[in-house]
Image (cartoon, rainbow, N blue to C red):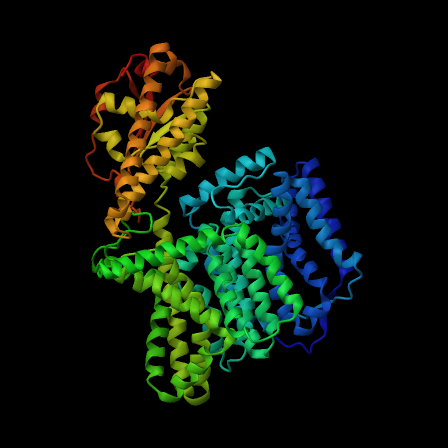
């Protein structure tokens, strides 16, 4: 876009105050009145304020950022909007465990006030727009990516991944209590703060944030790609590079799932762009920014550790004989403190354990050349894509046609000596070392380690990361071809663009199939449950975990499919008791019961993990025979104690179970839709009953205990009578 035309408007700090006033007015009006337009009004200005907060933070440092141009200001403002407010509010939330609407509104109002209070001379000119500019590759790519995402997110009303529902249910409880808790790894804490901030600013619930807001981070990756693509001369080459976010169907799906690592996917484009700018302009300033934001990301997802550690190694290697400015050392040390506090030692431990496993498996010849047709993931769960068709689907979806064409073109190009020397000179550039190391690591994770060491640590995600890191290889290939082989460059660019649209077709088809993961008949059953069953209900189900928990607003009791079809009455009764029997009201017994259940759960997890380690040959367990024997005894003793507690509670009062059970217990069965793409996945097969003829001997032979209260062609719901628990098992 031309920068010589007169600007449409020049943004100054005073303008931020005007936007802030409108936003506060929209919040007040939405709280006080019930007009149907007010939520839309607040949602719009809430998103504007969210992004302007990043711009305001950038405006505090006019000397550092203004000199690098308008596009760079946009890039840094996008990063600041994602990272800085969330991290600052994280510090407050950690100290107080409180996060509510008032805190969010006050924090963002303060961010917008800072440039004005500090009398920043910062200004930002928005260029005048004309319809002809829509033909520019940037708006063209922006519109294409946005339209593709719009088609994906509006195909069906639910989220495509069950993990997101788990996140929503956890965060909803925090929103209701106006508190914020740490779930699992603290390295994901900032993602909850970011989610709550967006909810408070826009008045949209978490479902709408994850369904319709966060996926549209993907079109914004155009801005970090454009500084690279603008140096290509042909329109087709520029567009082929700008559309890399659509190159991998797996990446598009991950963006619509909106899990924690969506922030990493978003940032990896910026990380690549900042390192390229550092090389292009020969300024370490961009390199340090890339590292600093990598450290910030450690509070969003553990995978940021790869960036932080590799960036630190680059500093140690290339600057070991150089006196780095003291301010950069201070910034690095400040960032290192939360690194140590928030899990880098755990990550180092994991890396060490995996290295030991790699060495042991290679020496023991524990290879798996059947990958990806057959393999177990890092949790020991079978996740293979069986047969030629399965393997083809795997690589088409995750590696993508775009990367396939790019890889083939690079292989042929490397056969040409001048280009090989040209590429090697780029790889040796200090600023590109983190990208080179990341590429090697992700290739190892995606292709080599699963085969040579039988260790499959999210190889599908590694392929998605490689699709993002392919920006620079694609750029240098097209750039070199444009200079010396213009006709070939046209052909390669055309092939890459064709591959992008093949990927779009692929994800559109997959998205079509995903609508059958929660078919209409299950949504109808959910509506019936909400309207007709009492609150505080618990539902036993072998599948539909996210569906049961979120859409029916019930507590789900998970169970393998065989519990519904093969268990005898006593087995089913004992299973329900073990899963649902609450601890008694007496505080002493309650503490014993809770501790026993906790220890038993941990021992079960240990036993599963131990079995997997042993089967995969990570270590020689013969060296730990005595310790394992002792732990087995502890596990056995814990089970005996827990059984004894349950038996004594029975003897104290045989009616205790019936009186303390939830208001109502139900069993839910839904036949998966034939087009459900997950029915044949090995890690979910045990939860699905897809046979045409299905029988439930125990449930149907004891109508005094199990009553069918809802029956449709593909859904059955039984009510469990309290009489089932009135006698001793």
Q: How far across and how far down the image is residue 72, in percent? A: 62, 69
Q: Residue at x 49, y 76 (%)?
A: 238
The residue lying toward the viewer, choosing from 537 and 451, is: 451
Q: Residue at x 44, y 55 (%)?
A: 348
Q: How far across and how far down the image is residue 726, in percent? A: 32, 12
Q: Residue at x 78, y 58 (%)?
A: 116
Question: Which quarter of the image is occupied by the C terminus?
Answer: top left
Which picture quadrant has residue 469? Answer: bottom left
Residue 40 makes an appearance in the image: no
On the picture, is 274 further left or further right than 589? right
Q: Is residue 642 above or below residue 221?
A: above
On the picture, is 285 further left or further right than 641? right
Q: How far across and how far down the image is residue 705, in percent? A: 29, 17
Residue 499 makes an appearance in the image: yes
Q: Is residue 310 above or below residue 632?
A: below
Question: Which quarter of the image is occupied by the N terminus?
Answer: bottom right
On the picture, is 455 further left or further right than 296? left
The residue lying toward the viewer, choosing from 312 and 274, is: 312
């Amino acid at each position: 876009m031309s920068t010589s035309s007169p600007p449409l408007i020049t943004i100054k700090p005073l303008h931020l105050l005007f936007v802030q006033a409108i936003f506060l007015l929209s919040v007040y009006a939405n709280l006080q009145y019930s007009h149907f337009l007010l939520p839309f009004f607040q949602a719009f200005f809430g998103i504007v304020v969210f992004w302007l907060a990043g711009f305001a933070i950038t405006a505090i440092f006019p000397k550092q950022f203004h000199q690098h141009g308008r596009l760079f200001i946009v890039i840094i403002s996008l990063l600041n909007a994602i990272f800085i407010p969330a991290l600052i509010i994280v510090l407050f939330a950690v100290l107080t465990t409180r996060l509510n609407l008032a805190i969010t509104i006050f924090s963002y109002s303060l961010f917008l006030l800072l440039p004005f209070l500090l009398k920043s001379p910062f200004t930002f000119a928005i260029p005048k727009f004309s319809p002809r500019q829509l033909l520019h590759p940037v708006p063209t790519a922006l519109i294409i990516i946005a339209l593709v995402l719009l088609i994906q997110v509006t195909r069906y009303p639910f989220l495509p991944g069950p993990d997101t529902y788990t996140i929503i249910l956890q965060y909803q409880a925090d929103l209701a209590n106006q508190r914020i808790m740490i779930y699992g790894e603290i390295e994901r804490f900032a993602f909850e703060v970011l989610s709550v901030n967006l909810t408070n600013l826009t008045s949209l619930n978490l479902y709408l944030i994850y369904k319709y807001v966060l996926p549209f981070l993907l079109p914004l990756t155009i801005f970090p790609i454009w500084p690279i693509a603008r140096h290509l001369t042909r329109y087709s080459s520029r567009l082929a590079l700008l559309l890399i976010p659509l190159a991998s169907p797996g990446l598009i799906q991950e963006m619509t799932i909106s899990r924690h690592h969506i922030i990493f996917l978003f940032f990896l484009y910026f990380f690549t762009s900042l390192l390229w700018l550092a090389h292009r302009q020969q300024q370490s300033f961009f390199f340090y920014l890339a590292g600093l934001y990598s450290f910030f990301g450690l509070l969003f997802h553990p995978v940021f550790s790869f960036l932080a550690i590799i960036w630190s190694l680059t500093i140690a290697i290339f600057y070991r004989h150089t006196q780095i400015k003291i301010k950069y050392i201070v910034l690095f040390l400040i960032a290192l403190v939360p690194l140590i506090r928030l899990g880098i030692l755990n990550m180092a431990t994991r890396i060490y354990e995996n290295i030991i496993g790699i060495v042991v498996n290679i020496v023991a010849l524990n290879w798996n050349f059947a990958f990806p047709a057959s393999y177990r993931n890092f949790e020991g769960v079978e996740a293979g894509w069986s047969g030629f068709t399965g393997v083809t689907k795997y690589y088409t979806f995750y590696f993508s046609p775009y990367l396939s064409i790019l890889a083939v073109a690079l292989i042929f190009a490397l056969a040409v000596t001048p280009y090989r020397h040209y590429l090697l000179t780029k790889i040796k550039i200090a600023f590109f070392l983190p990208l080179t190391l990341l590429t090697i690591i992700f290739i190892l994770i995606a292709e080599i380690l699963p085969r040579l060491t039988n260790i499959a640590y999210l190889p599908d995600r590694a392929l998605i990361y490689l699709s993002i890191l392919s920006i620079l290889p694609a750029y240098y290939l097209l750039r070199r071809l444009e200079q010396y082989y213009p006709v070939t460059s046209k052909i390669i660019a055309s092939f890459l663009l064709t591959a992008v649209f093949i990927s779009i077709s692929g994800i559109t088809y997959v998205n079509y199939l995903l609508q059958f993961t929660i078919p209409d008949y299950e949504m109808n059953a959910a509506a019936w449950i909400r309207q007709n069953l009492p609150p505080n209900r618990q539902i036993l189900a072998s599948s539909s975990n996210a569906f049961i928990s979120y859409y029916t607003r019930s507590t789900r009791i998970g169970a393998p499919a065989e519990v519904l079809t093969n268990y005898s009455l006593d087995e089913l009764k004992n299973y329900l008791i073990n899963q649902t029997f609450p601890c008694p009201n007496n505080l002493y017994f309650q503490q014993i019961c809770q501790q026993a259940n906790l220890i038993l759960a941990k021992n079960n997890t240990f036993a599963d993990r131990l079995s997997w380690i042993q089967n995969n040959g990570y270590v020689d367990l013969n060296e730990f025979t005595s310790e394992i024997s002792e732990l087995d005894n502890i596990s056995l003793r814990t089970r005996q104690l827990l059984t004894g507690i349950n038996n004594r509670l029975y003897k104290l009062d045989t009616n205790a179970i019936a009186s303390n059970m939830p208001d109502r217990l139900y069993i839910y069965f839904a036949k998966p839709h034939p087009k459900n793409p997950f029915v044949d996945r090995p890690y979910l097969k045990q939860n699905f009953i897809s046979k045409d003829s299905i029988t439930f001997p125990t449930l149907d032979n004891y109508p005094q205990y199990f009553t069918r209260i809802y029956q449709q062609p593909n859904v059955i719901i039984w009510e469990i009578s309290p009489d089932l628990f009135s006698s001793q098992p």
